Image (cartoon, rainbow, N blue to C red):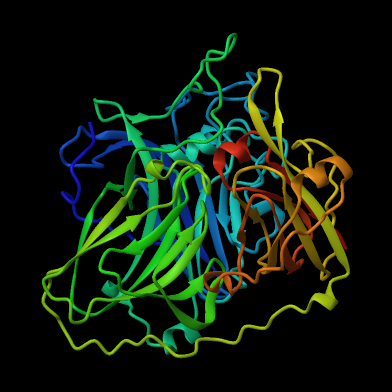
Amino acid sequence: MLLPKFVDELPIPPILKPRWKDQLQTYYEVNMTEFKQSLHSEQNDTTVWGYEGSYPGPTIEVESGEKVFIKWINNLPEKHLFPVDYTVHGAHVDVPEVRTVVHVHGASVEPESDGYPEAWFTKGFERVGPYFKKEVYQYDNNQKSVTQWYHDHALGITRLNVYAGLAGFYLIRDNRERLLNLPSGDYEIPLIIQDRSFHKNGALYYPNQQDKPIKGLETSIVPEFFGDTILVNGKVWPYLEVEPRKYRFRLLNGSNSRFYRIKLDSGQLIYQIGTDSGLMEYPIGIKEIILAPAERADVIIDFTNLVGKNIIVTNDAPAPFPDGDPASAVGIVMEFRVSLPLTSIDTSVIPSYMEPFSKIIEQSASKERYLTLNDNMDQYGREFMLLDNKTWDAPITENPKLGSTEIWYLINLTTDTHPIHLHLIDFQILDRRDFDVEKYNKERIIHYTGPALPPEPQERGRKDTVRANPKQVTRIIMKFGPYTGLYVWHCHILEHEDYEMMRPYIVIR
């Protein structure tokens, strides 16, 4: 049974208050618990996991340069909400079924506070993984204003923990952003878009097997998961009443595997002002925006002169992306209703210029790395993906030097677009270029079959997640720092990430 649309109002996650704060530092405590929450008013309450009793978690809002300490506290039950596949690396029977570790996605932090997948901990910190036994994480927030998000990152069960509800926004603000006079306060709203499926009783559904059950496996990881229902801020197909004025929305694709190609059915422009890692140099007016899992876009929508109109946010991205069945797109995301009276004159602006964006010069790169995205079969005949054809626990091969600049060639030999995310740093997309996959597989030679394509306008800024498309080489350039130590890079399709499409890398002195 599909639930009716636009019945419930969009919830806006609360801003988390610190436990204490002084001139030098700020301290938060964040509890992870299981609870029931209404995801649709015509359905039974749903058991979810969340931070501070909320799904999605409360928004953590900090200042650029503010030294923040967060104690992440696991108070979850010992039994998982969803079936665990013990054949997946990191989720074996000799480790606790419920483990968590929090990663602030996009954060520049020391390794001990980054949420390394094997730095997990259980309820009450009773058992901890083999890395970084640290209860309080430190975030120096040495970045400009940016939309980040926090979510679980435990090895082998990330897809299950995030699907259960463990995700929330983490926003860094600065004075430059304030001086731009963007829509703010009640007119700035974060939107985390996720897909889910439900049992008839309102419980979350997550498959315990592939379409064809695998002999000898009671529970099996699935190659991707696509829900048939869209939730925004934890509510099924909500509506938002707005005034006839400009609003700023922080868009985040928080889905496990689903991509979104978002448009407004009014045909009007969406003004993008920021990418994953902060504000762009200039705003751009676009009719559609593609968001891969974990990608963010900072946008302004102008509802002026639209009094009485209802505007539906649509999606037509096939699943899997880009070559799945178009019918697999869930076509509706949410609705805006321009039904509130204007409370005051709208003096906010869409600035003509926001902040300088200095391109990293290709010639400054001291190393180029050629890294494949590979498709494989396991002993059960299941598809699994690898980075550079290496498993999670293969020896580390990516070891950039602190302060060095590198260009990575992401050579996609699979049929999927993979959102590739690097921890610690942001990067810039140089280009994408079609190449002959068959020739590469036979001869290990990159034979380009088309010109280099510049990044799309919506990607021309600082990024931390890039869409590596099939049959293309995607080039990214980045400078490594300011910390040394152990980090990870991975596909952000969570089912891929959990089943080996993740690799450690180490920044060395």
Q: Is residue 211 left or right of residue 1?
A: right
Q: Is residue 448 above or below residue 455?
A: above
Q: Is residue 392 visible?
A: yes
Residue 298, how many percent across, how many down?
44, 70
Residue at image location 37% in from the left, 83% down from the top: 182
Q: Is residue 469 left or right of residue 244?
A: right
Q: Is residue 400 visible?
A: no
Where, quadrant-wise, is the N terminus in this rendering? Answer: top left
Q: Is residue 200 left or right of residue 377?
A: left
Q: Is residue 333 above or below residue 15?
A: above
Residue closest to the eye, 233 or 69: 233
Image-quadrant location for residue 339:
bottom left
Residue at image location 51% in from the left, 51% down from the top: 293
Q: Is residue 449 above or below residue 385?
A: below
Q: How many marks?
A: 0
Where, quadrant-wise, is the C terminus in this rendering? Answer: bottom right
Residue 360, how many percent across, how many down?
74, 78
Q: In this view, which residue lies farthest toward the top?
A: 216
Residue 174, how many percent across, how many down?
50, 80
Residue 418, how many percent across, how many down?
61, 49
Q: Is residue 241 above or below residue 316?
A: below
Image-quadrant location for residue 214:
top right
